[in-house]
Image: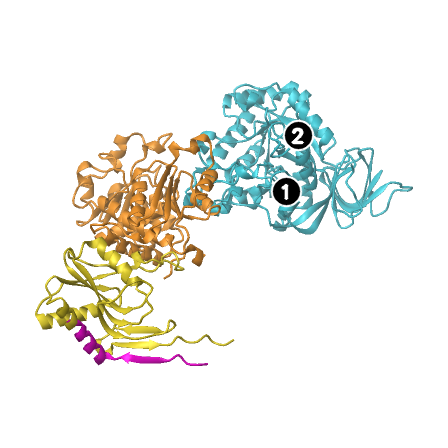
Chain colours: A orange, B cyan, C yellow
Amino acid sequence: MDWKRRHVLGLADFRVEEMEFVIDTARSMEEVLTRDIKKVPALRGKTVVNLFFEASTRTRTSFEIAGKRLSADVVNFSSSTSSVTKGETLLDTAKNIEAMKPNIVILRHYASGSPHFLSRFVSCSIINAGDGANEHPSQGLLDLYTILKAKGKIKGLKIAIIGDILHSRVVRSDLHSLGRMGANLWLCGPATMAPKEMERTGARVTYDIREAVKDADVVMMLRIQLERQKTAYFPSLREYSCKYGLNRAIFSLAKEDAVIMHPGPINRGVELSDELADCAQSRILNQVESGVAIRMALLYLLAGGHDAAH
Amino acid sequence: MLLIKGGRVIDPASGLDETGGVVLENGKVKDFLPGGQAPKGFQGRTIDAAGKWVLPGLIDMHVHLREPGYEWKEDIRSGTRAAAAGGFTSVACMANTKPVNDHPEITRYIREKGEREGFANVFPVAAVTRGLEGKEMADYAELAEAGAVAFSDDGKPVASSLLLRRALEYAKAFDFLILSHAEDRELSGEGAAHEGWTAHRLGIPGIPAAAEEVAIARDILLAKQTGGKVHIQHISTKMGVALLRMAKKSGVRVTGETAPHYFTLTDALLEGYDTNAKMNPPLRGEEDRMAVLEGLNDGTIDAIATDHAPHEDYVKRCEFIAAANGIIGLETALPLSLALLSGGKVTPARIVELLSANPAGILKLAGKGSLRKGADADVTVVDPEMEWEYRQQDILSKSRNTPFLGWKLKGRAVATLRGGRVTHSLLPGVAVDG
Amino acid sequence: MKKASRKVILDAKGMERVLSRLTHEILEKNKGAEELVLVGIMSGGVPLSKFIREKIRTIEGMDVPAGYVDITLYRDDLSRAGYQPRLKRTEIPFSIDEKKVVLVDDVLFTGRTIRAAMDALIDFGRPKNIQLAVLIDRGHRELPIRADYVGRNVPTSRSENVDVMVQGEREEWKVILREPTPAKGE
């Protein structure tokens, strides 16, 4: 297939073959990461700007490393140190950066739909690194890639995602990537955070972690976001950890060869026990590795021949 | 003297629905003449309304004219000009100006500016609480004397139940009316769109229907408790309509209004994060829209009012949650309301009730809302069949925040007269009076 | 409408003879297979490199390390293509430090592919030297690159195409010189 997208705004309208194409490209990129000299000149002379309005060291660093491995010039712009605190609108900030002619802008912003909005006004490519509660497409793809590497397939796997489903853009992107590839998805969390409505996507929603984890092939834990809540969705972290944290006992309900995933950063002892975070079945670090390869793939695919193709 | 002849005169307030001529003199309705003839010895202007409807001037009881304080979005002149083009001869304007209309001087300012420059009658609605802060009652009697026709903190709810109770009770003695923006702000929280599947899918924080319903229930019960009267603004929810219906049945003094977008659009418009789908209360689901329609059909909802909320381009040209709330509505209200006729349950007379007679009755506007002898010469001539496209270049409001751009509409005000003077005309040979 | 002309300039038997000769030349110049490494350039160079490796095993009784390199990420025309070319795989599972690397490709044309391949190799390590073996040299160099071992020199015009068909069974291998189909008349 020919890659025709100018932006990666979300996985909502990605066809399965497009997702497979990105994964395939990521495989080649991963080989680069095994060399001594982890660099190829493919994006030499291209400029990539990380435009982050929400704190995030890990995603930003992942994109930065991905860009540098491809020999691109990567520039970081984060809101706390900038004009946004002086009241500049998102559009103005983006237009200012566009005037410096980057090839790709990677945007993370707290407003859902902000990359979609920007894509109407700027001419460079945009990768959505997380917009509010909407999507985090590169995460959806790297989760897919990680599971493929661990299990060899997606179709028919029981994948349990546990945590703050309501506010999670990771879940939404995963529903598109894993769901479309035929996974049997189970979403679990406190009733205030696991809306039954999500069953409209074909996933099952349960408030009982044991039901979610039973016979699962993959157990994915979400970070419980204290910083997101103004009024509580659950009584206390202790209570949350009791009912929705993953420990050895609960995990033993999953299949014997089940793997553990987490988008990071982990609240050790809250959603994931200390021991499990580092155990042999944990694929959390593989996710990080896969993340760089996926992001290299996305940068590579977006960096080519715009003028000719568009 | 002015004769509007040959039109179908629809005036439910006086029980009239007949073809004939309406004679206006000295700013009042002089007479109605059935059939097509002119009065004996008539010497004056004639407006030929054959094939058109002749209605008592339409009244929009919920607009934001933005003056004083936000004149770049709209002002009294441009707002009333848009109103006249939409067929409105009177508008009631809300108090969330800058400074807030909580002082008789400001009420007087608005009233007088309206008289001097307005293309429609401007009836100021003053604040329920000083500064709209929800803490202290404003001086209702003085404000009424300065020309306020009702009181509302619209834009914001009156959060304190105790304060609303006091205000309703106090106002009872003077038969003052409070227009309530019913919203429980704690429940709506940081929401930006109706809490339903669409917002959920798009990751937009939701405003549950309960935020409106809880507040409507409270307002109704306080009206019941105090024996006062309350009017619920911009009803958008299924349970909200149901509560209003039940309250009326049990004799509570409550009336309600809705806006054209709540019976025309749903949250499906959110796709693509279109900020012209963002207003408060938000566009709801299809079930709510059907319930609002039912409420208009069966008499539960008394009035259609636009909640005309002009905003400059750049506060709408941004990411969804940051966009300002509201859309303009004066120029599209009539055709959107006329579309109700196609449902078969609403009659032309009912539409006139919703857009003229009832608002006049609710706000106690003497001489308005009817074409009986002696009423004010506020007349709207409507061509119910005219098909037209709502184009950006035709917008008379200063702002352009509307989801209806490009829509093919049916029905339009072809002439608007206020006090016997033409404020808007699409009829050849009928010019706007200077 | 003039039909495109197609000419088989090398058939399977002919290719076998040419590749055998190339193998002998490589062994002669390098005085045997010590320190030798074969790297086929994706995609056309890979089957040829396999052939040469087997031939070396037959002649010298030695197994020479062989890998393959995808030069897509090193191309100098990435922005100019209408789309991003599909990536293939690179596998060089051994050290090339101090080795004599023989790059194997099917057709040597402008020389840009070889330039990219050399850049890729240098990122893998520091070879003792890099040599180039090609089946066909069709001329029209745009960079100062030359092959050490050439199977057949085939002078061509710019518009002609040289197709090296080595994807199937060896009995079906051939090299075709093709004139492009002229544009259909309106």
Is A269 placed left or right of B108 in the picture?
A: left
Amino acid type indicated by mark 2: Leu
**Is residue C5 covered in magenta?**
yes
Q: Is residue A215 magenta?
A: no
Where A139 falls versus C97 (above or below)?
above
Name the residue beneath numbered marker 2.
B363
Q: Position of residue B312 (x, y in %)?
A: 57, 37
Judge from the rendering whether residue C134 lies leftward or rightward of residue B349; answer left or right.
left
- Residue B32 figure quarter: top right
Q: Amino acid at mark 1?
A: Ala
Q: Secondary structure at mark 2?
A: loop
Label annotation for residue A143: none
Q: Which residues are magenta?
A: C1-23
Chain letter of mark 2 equals B
Q: Nearer the viewer, residue A162 or C70?
A: C70
The earlier-in-sequence mark between 2 and 1 is 1
Circle number at residue B333: 1
Instruction: Name the residue: 65% across, 27% down.
Output: B124
Residue C49 in the image, given as x and y percentages of width and height: 20, 68
